[in-house]
Amino acid sequence: MSLDDDLASWAADVRLRDAEAAAIFERIVSTPVPEAAPRLDPTWWRGFNAGFTARMIASTRPARRVAA
Amino acid sequence: MSREAEFGRLYEAQRGAVHAYLFGRTADRQLAADLMQEVFLRVWRHLDAVIGMSSDRQRAWIFTVARNLSVDAHRQVLAEVGVAQALVREPARLPRPASTAVLAAERVAIVGEAIRRLPEQQRVTLSMATVGGMTSPEIAAALGIPAGTVRYRLSLARRALADALASYDDPKEER
């Protein structure tokens, strides 16, 4: 027997059998998938950022005028 | 394609490589199967995100999860059995074989024991090549290392196994 033959025999012993793989698959797909957490619409963040930026700019203008 | 069918396609494409990788990391067939189940359970839970990735990123994602889980499992084993017992044991002295079939079985046992004693990187690479049936470039892509490194590790591993078999064939020969 060559090393390759020995390795092939060893690998055949170790390798996951199709039946085992199928049983694992069945266990996984029967697991309920958690519902996705509710998320804000991406456009909400765009609007929020734009509004926040506009307010920051507006709120600092009077201070600059006073400083001048 | 249904969610289950999408998952099944990914599972069939990757399960052999993942189990071989986890066997290489743990040197324990059943633990590798348990960890593989955990890896693919995470794929199942995050399937929408994983499906949207390129195949390279999918593989990288799956192997990152597998690596993290095997590290956690290794820590747990060390905590449970103690560091001393987790170290590699001496191979058992086997009686001389009586027949060809027994000889073959004992050679496989010697190879298995020698593989268990390999440095982890070599064992992972050898396991992915022989158990997972992967080529050097495939292993390199999965592990994120150069293909030349994979070939080097394979050659070191094979040399160690050949030495173990030579010692078995001729017990006087100590290498």
Image (cartoon, coloured by chain):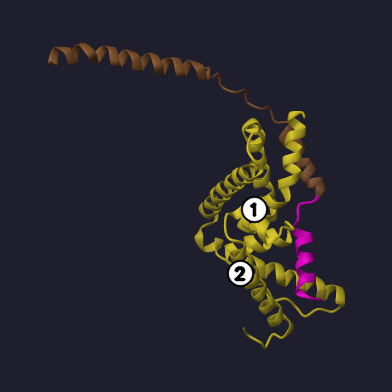
Chain colours: A brown, B yellow
- Residue at the (64%, 53%) spot, across then down: B22
Residue B148 placement: quadrant: bottom right
- Does A8 appear in magenta? yes
Q: Which residue is mark 1?
A: B22
Position of A29 relative to A38 (above/below):
below
Foreground pick, B13 / B28 = B13
Q: Secondary structure at mark 1?
A: helix
Residue B53 placement: quadrant: top right
Chain assignment, label 2: B
Quadrant for the N terminus of chain B, please: top right
Residue B141 placement: quadrant: bottom right
Q: Secondary structure at mark 2?
A: helix
Cα distance between the residues tagged 2 and 1? 20 Å
Q: Position of residue B121 (x, y in %)?
A: 58, 62
Quadrant for the C terminus of chain B, please: bottom right
Q: Is residue B28 visible?
A: no
Q: Position of residue B129 (x, y in %)?
A: 70, 61
Q: Amino acid at mark 1?
A: Leu
Specify the principal SS of the magenta part.
helix
Q: Which residue is mark 2?
A: B152
